[in-house]
Amino acid sequence: MQRLIILGAGTAGTMSANRLRSRLPNWSITVVDRDDAHHYQPGYLFVPFGDLPPERLVKPRHDYLNDGIELVLGDVDRVDTDTNTVVLDDGRELRYDQLVIATGSHPRPDQTPGMDGPLWHKDVFDFYTLEGTTALRNRLASWDGGRLVVHITEMPIKCPPAPLEFSFLADDFFRKRGMRDRVEIIYVTPLDGAFTKPIASATLGGMLKERKIHLEPDFVIERVDNDSHAIVSYDEREIPFDLLVTVPLHMGENFVGGSGLGDELNHVKVDPHTFQSRKHDNIFALGDAADLPTSKAGSVAHFAVDVFADNFVEHVAGRPMTHQFDGHANCFVESGNGKAMLLDFNYETEPLPGRFPVPGIGPLKLLAETRANHWGKRAFEWIYWHLLLPARPLPVSTDMSMRGKHEPATDLADVPSAPDQPRKTEVFK
């Protein structure tokens, strides 16, 4: 019997195991993770503002793995590619014929001097972990105002728009509490604008400006100064804060680097179209664990698994892999006041205006703030647990389509504002 081991029972690992179980009935499929707690990570964003209780975001991993899939709990120490063996911290050895690494990417505040120092989870917070977002909720409940700095350490990070979403929701949160005039919000990024793609960056930058959120670009942090309550860049700029909400450096699991499979951030080096390791033809990486040049997001895992499953079945049958992943990603961007924006893009094409998923009809608008988009994001929680993880079909194409999309006006600053349309924007130089 052939043995498939999947490291990681998060979004990509769970979906791929479930998708392959029915297609490889005579294979042994084992999923390995350190615990039996599956986190709905998109929900972390809403916890600080009291919109989602933390306990609703965690469910048993084994409940979402189909019958016939074995779940092994334990930390991975290393992958021995010479003997095709996964070695766990407690000494257990698991032999594989094919290996899928889907162990994600994780915030590492310890990699920035001072970030996890005396102010950690007191005046310095993350919202990319359940512990961090819960601690931030408790702090915001009693915070009486001051300078709020929202900061990104370095790309890539999980869900790149999430820090922007946090900023927009914070603006809305303080307005509803009648204290926005007592809060200065500064958005600090290593990028040269609000986002990685020019058209979306201009639109999102304009949204920051409208909300009087100051954008501080090209800021590469060197340290967090706990004594002076400031973040300090390598070019010696200092930004003081009363409350710092930071997105730490993201890295893959240590065993990836220790096994010689990863880049400097422990993300597995793979072919971006097939997810096959660049070093070993019986190893693949999916989701945030891979060094794909696209967003680390649940939608990427969903679209990638669709391609991977078809390719993997061909691969183990000794046939060439004929399917190519185009980097398709889409993500909702919460903007406050019950609205959200939707982005749809891939390796080659940046987010453009249009309608989704049905061209010309929608019902969702691309690169525009609408209430339908907001409810689409909130509905995703149910879709995630009941459709996405079980790997049931969704009415969304794996490949990105250009149908129904269009280039915006050349000068984005001249695009008129209208209800449910992108607001007037300014390109940040």
Image: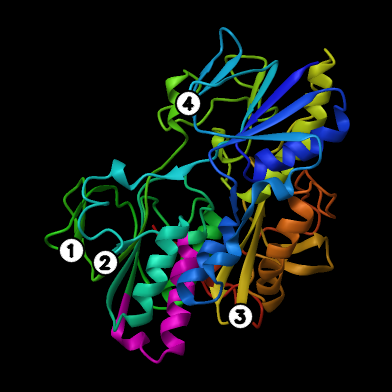
**How far across and down, in percent of the image, does residue 111 sit?**
30, 41
Which residue has dot 3 on it? 338
Q: Nearer the viewer, mark 2 or mark 3?
A: 2
Q: Nearer the viewer, residue 58 or 100?
A: 58
Q: Secondary structure at mark 2?
A: loop
Q: Secondary structure at mark 1?
A: loop
Q: Amino acid at mark 4?
A: Asp
Q: Amino acid at mark 2?
A: Asp
Compared to residue 262, the image places residue 46 above or below, namely: below
Among the two numbered marks 4 and 2 on one chain, the one whose residue lies closer to the N terminus: 4
**How far across and down, in percent of the image, does residue 199 sit?**
56, 58
Residue 325 found in image quarter = top right
Q: Are marks 2 and 1 in contact (CB under 8 Å)?
A: yes
Q: Nearer the viewer, mark 4 or mark 1?
A: 4
**How far across and down, in percent of the image, does residue 323 sit?**
80, 29
Compared to residue 270, the image places residue 180 above or below, namely: below
Q: Amino acid at mark 3?
A: Gly
Among the two numbered marks 1 and 3 on one chain, the one whose residue lies closer to the N terminus: 1
State the CA–CA distance, disc 2 to disc 3.
Answer: 28 Å
Query: Magenta segment, which residues?
Result: 163-184
State the CA–CA distance, disc 4 to disc 1.
Answer: 41 Å
Q: Are marks 4 and 1 in contact (CB under 8 Å)?
A: no
Looking at the rendered image, the quarter that the C terminus falls into is bottom left
| Magenta stretch secondary structure, dominant | helix
Please tell me which residue is depicted at 38% across the width and 80% down the height of the picture.
Answer: 141
Q: Is residue 143 magenta?
A: no
Q: Amino acid at mark 1?
A: His
Q: Is 384 displayed left or right of 102 in the figure?
A: right
State the CA–CA distance, disc 2 to disc 1.
Answer: 9 Å
Which residue has dot 1 on it? 229
Which residue has dot 4 on it? 90
